[in-house]
């Protein structure tokens, strides 16, 4: 099979590549990223540079790669590309005879906007922190008091997230982040969990829950256990969302009830950690999408996973050619990468 993975410079995209390389699948990996120094490019069999997703030329450049490579499936490794590709999924699949493992655009929209996520959960009676927009913050304070969590409605890796414990700090945070959502602070950082689930044809047949500790917005310690009750709640949420393929649910445990503060309609940065625990969601998803193999819940053994840095060494000739580009153009960067691909 040929698998095209975007975001080779992102933790998410790199995690997908690592999970795929850990499988027994005979896969040709095609990686793409805007930067020639994205480490994931050097882990792939072939690599391409693309403009930033915000660039008007991104979609045309991406389609040129689809036409050239004819991948069997596309896995998205950045948030910034997800909604755009979801909007064009049907056309891209039909035109280039490929599969994009992406949920419908409306599902991606709900997941990327934390206020829409809250409304989705709250309207269905699914566990979530009490939340408000800035115009309704006084009612929220009266209901739950302090401390409160202030975060951007659209964001990732805890960027812009602040804990406030009194009025002046709240007002300052809202002045700095006007397009914010305000949420009650649930439990403690030691009660935080991340979960992965796979949904096909409206059914979630496989999921995994890990308790986690964060550093710089990313999971750096994960504690794996079966957690049957928590998995049942995660599966209920994933199915209600109407996702297609991978779903990531992040929550804190408030007593026995989960309170979800974020949903991602995609794989997540903890995808390779889940693979270490025997839950390789990339392999499971590819076998279902390409070979129509049934999704079967893997057995999850209790363990602790400690994350650490690793290095990728790029040969000196490639590095010099890359850094010699005083005005990096897409054509020039492609020429530098052409030394290897």
Image (cartoon, rainbow, N blue to C red):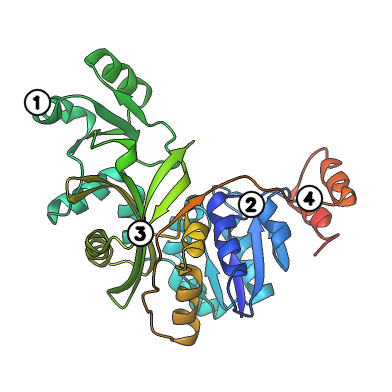
Mark sitting earlier along the chain (3/4): 3
Residue at mark 3 = 225
Q: Earlier in the sequence, mark 2 or mark 4?
A: 2
* Image side of residue 117 versus residue 315, left or right: left
Q: CA distance from mark 2 to mark 3?
A: 41 Å
Q: CA distance from mark 2 to mark 4?
A: 24 Å
Cβ atoms under marks 2 and 4 closer than 8 Å: no
Q: Which residue is mark 1?
A: 142
The location of residue 146, given as percent across then percent down, is 19, 24
Q: Are marks 1 and 2 in contact (CB under 8 Å)?
A: no
Q: On the image, numbered disc 4 is attached to which residue?
A: 313
State the mark number for residue 51: 2
Displayed quadrant of residue 190: top left
Where does residue 127 sit, x and y in percent of width and height? 18, 50
Mark 3 or 1, nearer chain start: 1
Q: Residue at x 25, y 64 (%)?
A: 228
């Amino acid at each position: 099979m040929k698998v095209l993975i975007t975001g080779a410079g992102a933790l998410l995209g790199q995690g997908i590549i690592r999970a795929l390389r850990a499988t027994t699948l005979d896969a040709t990996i095609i990686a793409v990223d805007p930067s020639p120094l994205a480490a994931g490019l050097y882990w792939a069999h072939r690599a391409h540079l693309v403009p930033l997703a915000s660039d008007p030329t991104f979609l045309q450049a991406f389609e040129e790669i689809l036409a050239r490579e004819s991948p069997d499936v596309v896995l998205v490794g950045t948030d910034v590309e997800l909604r755009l590709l979801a909007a064009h999924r049907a056309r891209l699949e039909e035109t280039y005879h490929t599969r994009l493992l992406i949920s419908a655009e409306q599902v991606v929209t709900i997941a990327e906007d934390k206020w829409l996520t809250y409304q989705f959960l709250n309207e269905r009676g699914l566990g979530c922190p009490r939340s408000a927009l800035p115009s309704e913050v006084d009612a929220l304070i009266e209901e739950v008091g302090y401390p409160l969590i202030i975060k951007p409605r659209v964001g990732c890796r805890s960027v812009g997230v602040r804990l406030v414990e009194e009025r002046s700090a709240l007002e300052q945070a809202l002045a700095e982040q006007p397009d914010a959502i305000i949420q009650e602070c649930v439990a403690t950082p030691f009660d935080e969990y991340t979960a992965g689930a796979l949904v096909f044809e409206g059914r979630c047949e496989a999921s995994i829950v890990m308790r986690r500790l964060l550093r710089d917005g990313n999971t750096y310690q994960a504690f794996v256990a079966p957690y049957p009750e928590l998995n049942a709640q995660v599966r209920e949420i994933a199915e209600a969302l109407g996702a297609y393929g991978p779903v990531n649910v992040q929550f804190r445990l408030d007593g026995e009830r989960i309170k979800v503060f974020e949903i991602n309609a995609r794989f997540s940065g903890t995808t390779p950690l889940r693979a270490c625990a025997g839950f390789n969601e990339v392999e499971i998803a590819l076998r279902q999408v390409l070979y129509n193999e049934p999704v079967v819940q893997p057995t999850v053994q209790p363990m602790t996973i400690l994350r650490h840095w690793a290095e990728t060494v790029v040969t000196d000739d490639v590095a010099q050619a890359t850094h010699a580009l005083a005005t990096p153009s897409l054509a020039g960067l492609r020429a530098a990468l052409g030394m290897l691909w």
